[in-house]
Image (spheres, rainbow, N blue to C red):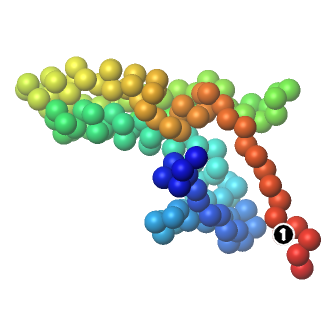
Amino acid sequence: MTDQSIRSIELTRTSLGHYEAINPRGGRLSFGSGAGDHFTPVELLLAAIAGCSAADVDHITAKRAEPTRFEVQMSGDKVRDDNGNHLVNLSLTFDITFPSGPEGDAAREALPRAAAQSHDRLCTVSRTVELGSPIDVTIEGASRQ
């Protein structure tokens, strides 16, 4: 892997059940374990899938026409079975409207192919979820005081 291919975040505990992720560009995202209105890690995963695919579709279709509405719904059922906790029945739904006219027609025509390209090839997040990838877990500093 090259330095250009590495994606990373740093995560800091801010209090019990509350965390802050910081990306290499300085962006910050607070989330938690479900108390209050903070996003949970599962909701962040759903948002990442939806956001990744939305960005792909947006960049492709907006070359033809700006949408008048662009909404995406992402859902899944959390289950606990012999494989542990995980999501099943993942569903991504686009609700996008384009203006009347030739540009809007071109965007509407490009939409199904753009969604398919995102799903089949472009969206790193959904591709990683669908293909699966082992996660190497390392513990550092556990003996420090």
Element at label 1: loop
Q: Position of residue 53 (x, y in %)?
A: 42, 35
Residue lying at the far left in this picture: please name it: 101
Task: Answer left or right for 62 relative to 90.
Answer: left
Any part of residue 112 in sight: yes
Q: For the point 77% across and 36% down, which residue is it? A: 85
Q: Position of residue 27 (x, y in %)?
A: 47, 65
Tell me where residue 141 sits by quadrant: bottom right
Task: Answer left or right for 80 relative to 7.
Answer: right
Residue lying at the far front in this picture: please name it: 2
Q: For the point 53% across and 38% down, which residue is it? A: 125
Q: Position of residue 139 (x, y in %)?
A: 83, 59
Any part of residue 38 in sight: no
Task: Name the quarter where the C terminus is drawn.
Answer: bottom right
Task: Answer left or right for 6 relative to 25.
Answer: right
Q: For the point 67% across and 54% down, which residue is it? A: 34
Tell me where residue 81 sits by quadrant: top right
Q: Nearer the viewer, residue 36 or 116?
A: 116
Q: Position of residue 41 (x, y in %)?
A: 64, 50
Q: Does residue 138 lie above or below 69 as drawn?
A: below
Q: For the point 60% across and 27% down, which residue is it? A: 130
**Amino acid type, mark 1:** Gly
Which residue lies under the disc numbered 1?
A: 141
